[in-house]
Amino acid sequence: MSGVREVVVGYDGSDFSMRALEWATDEAELGGVPLKVIHTWRWPYGEADEAARLHLRGAAGHVLYHGADCARACSTLREVTTELYEGSAAERLVELSERAALIVVGSRGMGTLARTVLGSVAGHVAARAGCPVVVVRGAGPVPASRKRGAVVLGMSGDTSDGVIEFAFREADIRRLELTAVHAGRLQPLVHDTRVAMNAAEDGMLERLGPWRVAYPGVAVRACFAATSAKDLLEDVSREASLVVVGGARDHGRLGSTSRAVLRHGFCPVAVVPAGWRSPSRNEPVLSGVRHLR
């Protein structure tokens, strides 16, 4: 399958990475693409003889191969490859993102304190990757939920086409509804707030028009809320299957909304880099489409 972009997942044997592996396996299977499982290791004790280093490397290899075996056993994937890398996990995943379809990483648990802390690897990769990154929250593996929430697309005045494309594709392959949400303020002199909110939602649906044509099987709902984007996305993440937001625009720094949903969200969060385009399909024709204001 030379030339086919892979789903790449970072795996270290922890509960957090087990859930990421489960999510990445589903993604690769649904998308019909290969899966690459990567594990990194480092010698942490200063100088050491070669035998000791080889012993640690062998232990790391066992962790990696266990992850790959789990992916093969729990899916119908034809191609599951592995990579054992000595060095920084974050830096290696960023390197692989330049030719990957998607990077998947685990993060910390779902307790009140744990949800406010984003792991250093997840945060670094989400801010600097060249392809979309999904950060899977919480420990696992867990039984699949019987309630399948929507894919939530966080929209703003400058949401890129790539973010929209990714959200529609995920909703399409997972056969889920797509809910587009936009937080903003109504004009102070607006007398009928419901009319104003309906107009804002109509504008959102107009913006999404080309993708609604390209993905006719995806049911789309628009929701405008007069609140902060951070509060809105955290709230909808409680019932969502996936929240999709835009990534860093300069110097590898995520915006405040993306950082907030990564830290406080209750479901997996996809961060799509600015300027990203899906390599697997042609973009819809976007000429004449009005952006949100």
Image (cartoon, grey):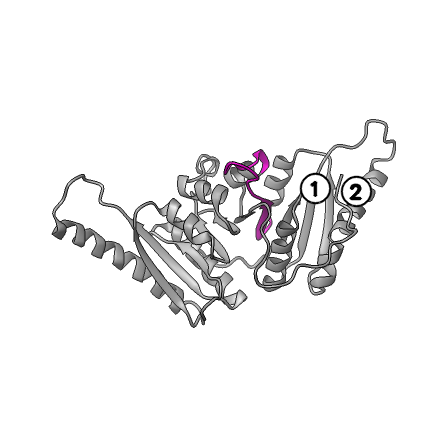
With respect to residue 70, does 255 lie above or below? Answer: above
Q: Position of residue 209 (x, y in %)?
A: 76, 55
| Magenta region | 239-257
Identity of the amino acid at label 2?
A: Ala
* CB atoms of marks 2 and 1 within 8 Å: yes
Q: Secondary structure at mark 2?
A: helix
Q: Position of residue 218 (x, y in %)?
A: 69, 61
Does label 2 or label 1 sit earlier along the sequence? 1
User: Can residue 139 be seen here?
Assistant: no
Specify few, some or many for label 1: CA neighbours under 10 Å numbering under 14, 14-19, or 20 or more. many
Q: Which mark is residue 200?
A: 2
Q: Residue at point 79% right, 46% down?
A: 203
- Main SS of the magenta part reads loop
Q: Residue at point 42% right, 57% down?
A: 21
270 displayed left or right of 141: right
Q: Is residue 37 highlighted in magenta?
A: no
Q: Position of residue 199 (x, y in %)?
A: 83, 43
Q: Position of residue 293 (x, y in %)?
A: 76, 38
Q: Quadrant of the N terminus?
A: bottom left
Q: Is residue 245 highlighted in magenta?
A: yes
Q: Secondary structure at mark 1?
A: strand
User: Can residue 217 be seen here?
Assistant: yes
With respect to residue 9, does 254 lie above or below? Answer: above
Specify few, some or many for label 2: CA neighbours under 10 Å numbering under 14, 14-19, or 20 or more. many
Q: Mark 2 and mark 1: span between their CA atoms?
A: 9 Å
Residue at numbered disc 1: 182
Q: Residue at point 54% right, 42% down?
A: 265
Q: Quadrant of residue 249?
A: top right
